[in-house]
Image (cartoon, rainbow, N blue to C red):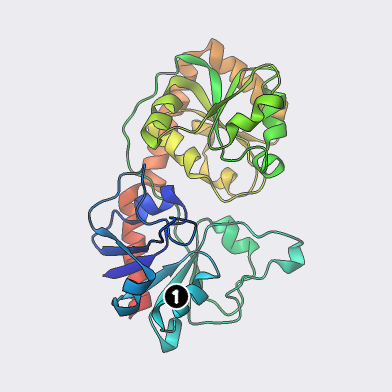
Amino acid sequence: MRILAWHVHAAWMTSFVQGAHEYYVPVLPDRGPDGKGRAQTYPWPDSVQELTPEQLRSADFDVVVLQRHHELELFQRWTGRALGRRGVPAVYVEHNTPRGDVDDWRHPLAARGDIPIVHVTQFNRTMWDNGLAPAEVIDHGVPDYGYQYTGTLDSLLVSVNEPVRRSRVAGMDLVAKLAEHVPVSVYGLGTDELSGLIRTGLTGTGAVSQAELHRRMAMHFAYLHPYRWTSLGLSLIEAMTLGVPVLVVAATAAPEAVPSAAGVVSSDLELLASTAGRWLSDPAEARERGLAARTHALTHFGLPKFLDEWDRMLKEVCR
């Protein structure tokens, strides 16, 4: 198939473009949010081609994969064509949990029934009011980066971009509390802004490449997922795939995604802190939990399963 999709979330898109199709991604001179083009730091295959808005007008597509509501208007303006029943087949990937008051959680596509919504977690599908739109779930999929766990660093790792701006959503206050008991390293864009806010035990390390992040993930004795309100983070699944045991705040889709054998999922910070201390003194248990995490991640979030489900979905939409 010939698939048009904007480059929005690099980690999700890296998995999506591994299929046996031709992929087109819009590109703008400034490579801003509506025209990032190919990823610069993620391994994308040669089947992914950049197209300018001018080139999009004459290009042919079998299906368009939307990820933000304004892309419907962008597509029509850049190509002169409609989407859905009267135009090019389309599907909308909803990466996010709804925001605002619970009574306002109506999806932007809820009023039309010709563009299905694919949620990345069952939790998201349940929370959103999908209205007339057909709603399905295709779980995240990540490549198998191999078993890399060493656990040689006596600190937890957190992966979050813009931790100051997203402090409450990302649970950075929870991270700070846990850092009073065990050292925590925070990786991601904007973590340098933590310098004036960090407490003893909490370190902002900055952004690194995907490969380097995976290498460092495997060196920390455990991965901490502190998010209060988010779709299931791919970094959590990647850590599990690497064989890292996980400590997870019990919110949104996390309780359904992480089995008890892989770590601890709880809203009790004292339990998370005491578990971290126990794993530090018992690395054999930490390693055992990490192996269970890897087995679960490969089974439930493996790339072959993800690509098979997307092939099925795209064929149904095009039909």
Number of numbered discs visible in the structure rendering: 1
Q: Please name whichever residue, 120 or 194, is drawn nearer the observer in this view of the structure.
A: 194
Vertical comparison of 7 with 136: above or below: above
Vertical comparison of 220 with 45: above or below: above
Residue 287, position as x, y percentages in the image: 44, 21
User: For this view, does 213 lie left or right of residue 144?
Assistant: right
Q: Amino acid at mark 1?
A: Phe
Q: Label 1 belongs to which residue?
A: 75
Q: Please name whichever residue, 299 or 280, is drawn nearer the observer in this view of the structure.
A: 280
Vertical comparison of 252 with 261: above or below: below
| Quarter of the image where the C terminus is located | bottom left
| Quarter of the image where the N terminus is located | bottom left
For the point 44% across and 81% down, the residue is: 83
Vertical comparison of 131 with 254: above or below: below
How crowded is the residue under tag 1: few (<14 C-alpha within 10 Å), some, or many (20+)? Answer: many
Q: Please name whichever residue, 7 or 294, is drawn nearer the observer in this view of the structure.
A: 7
For the point 46% across and 79% down, the residue is: 77
Residue 305, position as x, y percentages in the image: 34, 53
Residue 212, position as x, y percentages in the image: 39, 29
Determine the secondary structure under disc 1: helix
